[in-house]
Image (cartoon, rainbow, N blue to C red):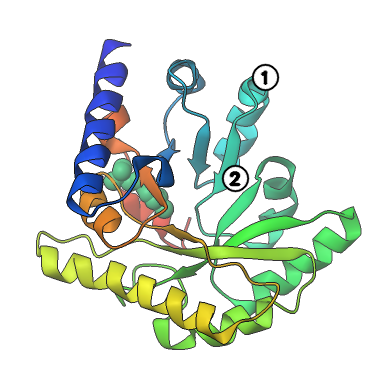
Amino acid sequence: MKTIENNLKVIKSRIAKACMVSHRDPSDIRLLLATKTVDTERISQIIGLGESLLGENKVQELKQKCPLLMKFKPEIHFIGHLQSNKIKEVLKWAHCIESIDRLSIAKKLQQRLEFEDKHIDVYIQVNTSSESSKFGIPPTETIELVKAVAQFDRIHIKGLMTIGLLSSKLDDVRRCFKLLKELQQNIIDLNLPPVEMKELSMGMSGDLEIAIEEGATIIRVGTAIFGERIYSDQYYWNESH
Ligand SMILES: *Cc1c(COP(=O)(O)O)cnc(C)c1O
């Protein structure tokens, strides 16, 4: 209990510090708790500390945990790779899908939303590090995808998401976040009426300061609050699972 509470305090002071450096207001940055592998007991604890924005990667975990968490009315973002046969289940729980990275999945999502007479907020996930192991649309194809998804009247684009390069070379990490910010500005300049580009979801336990300095509005933190996971991130980020 104390550990999570202390870790949360540390994260908040890291956010505050990064905001000082970049002259930003901490209230403009939302903390999303990346709760993959974290059980509902621990998630309930952190909700009790005033946090309410949760991100899950796997449909299996959404299905297991969300029924037990609904009483707290958390805001759920889906941040994992979205497969078409899982759309229906994701729509049961998620308020936002941060990982739209291809037209085919957006098409299927629109169809399902029409069927259910629903709408959903999404971010477009960009592969800013160009690592083949990661999902996301290549930066050069992002604008084209945004334009195409904007045609779907039930899908509301709110911003962009990226997983930065996992590297100790901070300049290379920063380049990823700068690229996302640039893409955001390019899209804003196109003035595509239904598209909102206020949100930039970027920055994790290891690189949240850089992301905040480069304009993140949502940082997604797991390890620094809940501790190391037993599964490697590749388990969550790769297609084969
Ligand atoms: C796990 C995960 C995070 C959080 O990563 P940490 O390094 O544990 O803070 C953020 N975003 C996505 C998409 C994730 O899968």
Could you tell me which residue is drawn at 10 percent across and 59 percent down? 168
The label shown at residue 194 is none
Q: Nearer the viewer, residue 104 or 24?
A: 24
Residue at 48% in and 55% down: 241
Please state the horizontal and vertical placement of residue 217, each as a whole percent of the image. Answer: 42, 53
**Type of amino acid under label 2:** Val
Spatial separation of the CA atoms under disc 1 and disc 2 = 19 Å
Quadrant containing the N terminus is: top left
The residue drawn where x is 66% and y is 46% is 95
Respond yes or no on whether mark 1 lies under 8 Å from ligand 1. Answer: no
Q: Is residue 38 left or right of residue 196?
A: left
- x%, y% of residue 174? 21, 66
Reading the image, the residue beneath label 2 is: 59
Question: Residue 71, which numbered label?
Answer: 1
Mark 2 surroundings within 10 Å by alpha-carbon count, few (fewer than 14), some (14 through 19), many (20 or more): many
Name above or below for residue 217 compared with residue 56. below
Task: Specify which label sits upstream in the sequence, 1 or 2.
Answer: 2
